[in-house]
Amino acid sequence: MNYWQAETIRLRGVEPEDAQHFFRWNQDSERARQLDFVWPPISLSSVEGWAMEQSAQKFKDDAFHWVIETLDGQPVGSISTHDCNLRNGTFSYGVDVAEEHRGNGYAAEAIRLILRYYFEELRYHKVNVGVHSYNEASLRLHERLGFVREGALREAVYTRGRRYDMILFGMTADEFRDNESRLSARPDPR
């Protein structure tokens, strides 16, 4: 039993050779826009340095960056945790799946693995996630996973010459457990 493995993916730490994947993924400006903003070009050497640092990184302050890979070892994206607040028991994450691998449920499985770990192993109480209002796929994903839409930061994101809302989602540990129970109680659709 690998705690970090789901039905179709597993999570693993970043390795130096992952720089090639991240460099290629960073060439997709729309991907960057969905995550944060359109980044300026960055050298392969810089990405290699980042991947080397990540590969040596310890699990500090409960924040970490994982590669999402298929069970046959194909890297398809990444997920990272941040804003981990032990005092309040809250954390956030960002998830990204390369365009050619979207629509396969990889992001949902990675998110569920992270939620299970932070709620059931690290004793966090709540996850908070911000999604750009124009990222309809991510909005649907979080709603499907049972997140509660808690509000919006109006006109908090600027891109494409316009301002967009940041939609705020949250889920408590109890809501996660209830949602997981419902999902496991569903009959197999096959």
Image (spheres, grey):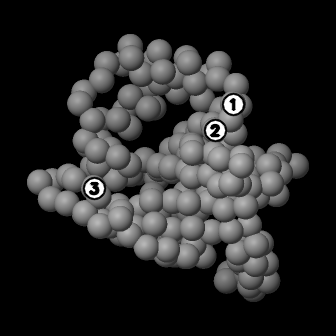
Instruction: Residue 8 in the image: state x and y as whole percent.
Output: 66, 56
Quick check: can you spot residue 52?
yes
Q: Is residue 134 toward the left or the right of residue 170 in the image? A: left
> Badge 1, how many Cα within 10 Å: few under 14, some, many 20+?
few
Which residue is at the far front?
87
**Which of these two is toward me, 41 or 99?**
41
Mark 3 sits on what residue?
A: 157
Q: Is residue 21 left or right of residue 16?
A: left
Q: Secondary structure at mark 3?
A: strand
Q: Which mark is residue 63?
A: 2
Instruction: Label 1, secondary structure: give it.
Output: loop
Q: Amino acid at mark 3?
A: Val
Assign the C terminus to one quadrant of the image.
Answer: bottom right
Q: Amino acid at mark 2?
A: Ala
Nearer to the camera, 6 or 172:
172
Residue appearing at x 49%, y 74% in the figure: 150
Check if mark 2's residue and mark 1's residue have beta carbons within 8 Å.
yes
